[in-house]
Image (spheres, helix red, strand yellow):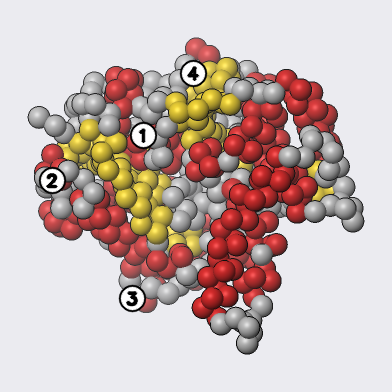
Amino acid sequence: MTSYALGLDYGSDSVRALLVDTQTGNEVATNVVYYPRWKQGLFCEPAKDQFRQHPLDYLESLEQVIQGLWKLAPADAAKNVIGVSFDTTGSTPVAVDKDGVALALKPEFAENPNAMFVLWKDHTAILEAQQITEAANNASENYLKYEGGIYSSEWFWAKALHVLREDKAVAEAAYSWVEHCDWMSAVLTGTTHPEKFRASRCASGHKQMWHASWGGYPPNDFFTGIDPLLDGLRDKLPADTFTSDEVCGQLVAEWADKLGLPEGIVVTFSAFDCHMGAVGANVKPGVLTKVMGTSTCDITVATYEEIGDNCIKGICGQVDGSVIPGLVGLEAGQSAFGDLYAWFRRLINWPLQNIEASDLIDAETKAKLAQEIEDKTLFKLGEEAAKLPVGQSGVTALDWVNGRRTPDADQTVAMAITGLKMGSQAPQIYRALVEATAFGSRAIIERFKEEGVRIDSVVTIGGISKKSDFVMQTCADVWNSPIDVLESEQSCALGAAIFAAVAAGIYPNVAAAQEVMASPVCKTYQPNPENVAKFDALYEKYKALGAYVDGAKK
């Protein structure tokens, strides 16, 4: 009998649902729903690096995306779903009360951004991250040695501490904090109450300093030494953590009814989007999977023998089982990739969106034309930028428009552009921005190799890898590496579906499920030998500019 696995991928802007046939690996149906409050820009202040998402955006969109999926799927497909799994952005934590209710779901906090999920790209906690890093470096045990040695403002403890310091009402009401990925599994299984709540290995290991060697989280006095506001929080977090092939619980009746799914089917422990995306991409030792979207997340895995006692510096963590059980998962990434291109598009299209309509054109027509032009801007820029000889523009840029995630996290740095002249036009600048994102990725690859992590090939997933030949060819030339692009449009949700199939017992392990369900390659980019040496020289300019900016801020 046909059975289906359901993968849910919560991205920065939307949730994607993917229905996969567990016997054939065919992607049967997919649906996307955008978060309504987020789309309106509510609760966010980009000038302050504040990005918050309301839990209702997640819950309402979940119902909409699943109910819409059944209109696209084969008849009665819902009855044959055997398991559900989630991936989300991260670190994206929220404060919960003593009953496990996300504070923003309570009337008194419904409009308070501090009571909402603090999105991964929120960088309001830079000071707190610096203080955590300093405390770890001064401790007898460095609790960051498995997280790259530097704590990031994008991560759990810094965000929680920042909110607790900033908002007394939230601090008094908050009993604990949970990650978005863990919250989704708990909601569907009725385990949000702190006495029932259990956590994933992925989120805990990469963002919360959980490690088996020190019995879970760092001791309470480590946190109180940073700020007494953290007193007792680590003891309210689940001591044990679980990999995503394990069952978190069964789908409760309330959500089975809302989603049109069978009550009692398995719900797995969740993980971050890039980790499950790597599983959908058939990641294995020596293969680096790059999830290329608004930011990038770079994932690879290593055997215990390969990694040994080596602590990789400047990345986002090395965690046993965070990607595939039985292997060490390693994470890195860039804080902005597509976001850098989107910033430039908004910059040059500002007049179109802000100049008022006139007697010659009505407001509705003006808005329609402005949107049409903006939608085509990056495509046209890419066309023209691709015609420019490598190195001819003389423009060099950094990709740090949203800070630097890796190597060596630092959210206080800013992007820079040098070499601008009167003759510099938008295509020349856009080319420099694309090169900057490729150089930032190269820095990550080189750091892995310098630290002894084997990288033999690169696989890419995400919207950018399917949309822009110019960006992908530039990356192949800069990295001097072939790049495989996956066929699946929803690789992260596909990875989640693979875990759902394993947890439901369809396959004995992830590797067996990947053989049937992982995405095939649709296109390969080969480096152009004529451009490789030219980009080597430009990369040195990128590193010099980065060193200057790093030095200037100190």
The residue identified by callout 4 is 285
**Disc 2 to disc 1, C-alpha distance:** 24 Å
Name the N-terminal-most of marks 4 and 3: 3
The residue identified by callout 1 is 495
Indicate left or right for 542 with 407 as reference: right
**Disc 3 to disc 1, C-alpha distance:** 36 Å
Q: Residue at x 27, y 59 (%)?
A: 64
Name the N-terminal-most of marks 4 and 2: 2
Q: Amino acid at mark 1?
A: Gly
Name the N-terminal-most of marks 1 and 4: 4
Q: Amino acid at mark 4?
A: Pro
**Disc 1 to disc 4, C-alpha distance:** 17 Å
Mark in the foreground, 2 or 1: 2
- Could you say which quadrant of the image residue 475 lies in? top right
Q: From what the image shows, is residue 82 above or below residue 123? A: above
Name the N-terminal-most of marks 3 and 2: 2
Mark in the foreground, 4 or 2: 2
Q: Amino acid at mark 3?
A: Pro
Helix or strand or loop: what does disc 1 sit on? helix
Q: Amino acid at mark 2?
A: Ala
Q: Nearer the viewer, residue 305 or 485?
A: 485
Name the N-terminal-most of marks 3 and 1: 3
Q: Which mark is residue 107?
A: 3
Helix or strand or loop: what does disc 3 sit on? helix
Q: Are marks 3 and 2 in contact (CB under 8 Å)?
A: no
Q: Which mark is residue 75?
A: 2
Helix or strand or loop: what does disc 4 sit on? loop
Mark in the foreground, 4 or 3: 4
Q: Residue at x 34, y 64 (%)?
A: 56
**Disc 4 to disc 2, C-alpha distance:** 40 Å
Question: Residue 181: percent from the left, percent from the top?
Answer: 37, 47
